[in-house]
Image: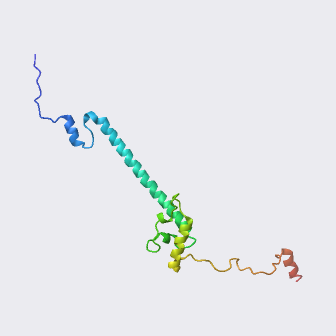
Amino acid sequence: MSTPTEAPEVDQPDAPEAEEQTHGDQAPEGDATHGQGRRIARERREAAEARAEVAEARVAALLRREVERVAAAHLSQPGDVLDAALGGVTLDDLLDPETGEVDPEAVAEAAAAVAEARPGLAALRPRGDFDGGSRGGVVSRAASWSDVLRRRGPA
């Protein structure tokens, strides 16, 4: 019968040491589940932070639109109220400190200040009469077909 042959031994690094070298932020093999749990927790935290940033950007955009809506009564370009070169106010300056909502009075004051400093930026006020040209007087009833035929008379 033949004798079993043994494979020659080759220097191989221990498995836990090799894993530590390739995956620096994960735990050794004994703590593999713990390392995986930390990775999952980190990914969840990063995803939550990204969602929070998106939500903050959306809220800021909504607040900015509300400021512009209120400022439209005073300025032809309502976004000018938040232009640092024109008024020097920020979105936070126009929010109610207690509720965090847009303060219409603060927006009106800031827009009026911009309009006063630069009258050309003020909203245009329509002038004139918008009644389509109708001016007093008695309106007669409309002519009917019988009126038209009577006027014509016999030929």
85 to 46, vertically: above or below: below
User: In the image, 120: left or right of 4?
Assistant: right
Q: Residue at x 38, y 46 (%)?
A: 45
Q: Quadrant of the N terminus?
A: top left
User: In the image, 68: left or right of 33?
Assistant: right
Q: Residue furthest bottom?
A: 155
Image location of residue 139, percent across then percent down: 81, 78
Residue 71: name its quadrant. Answer: bottom right
Looking at the rendered structure, the number of numbered marks drawn on it comes to 0
Residue 57: name its quadrant. Answer: bottom left
Residue 45 visible in image: yes
Looking at the image, which is closer to me, 130 or 52?
Answer: 52
User: In the image, 4: left or right of 85?
Assistant: left
Q: Quadrant of the C terminus?
A: bottom right
Q: Residue furthest front?
A: 98
Q: Residue at x 56, y 67 (%)?
A: 105
Residue 91 visible in image: no
50 to 138, vertically: above or below: above
Image location of residue 47, percent across then percent down: 39, 48
64 to 147, vertically: above or below: above
Q: Residue furthest right?
A: 154
User: In the image, 96: left or right of 21?
Assistant: right
Looking at the image, which is closer to me, 88 or 71?
Answer: 88
Q: Residue at x 86, y 77 (%)?
A: 147
Image location of residue 2, percent across then percent down: 10, 18
54 to 144, vertically: above or below: above
Looking at the image, which is closer to me, 12 or 123?
Answer: 123
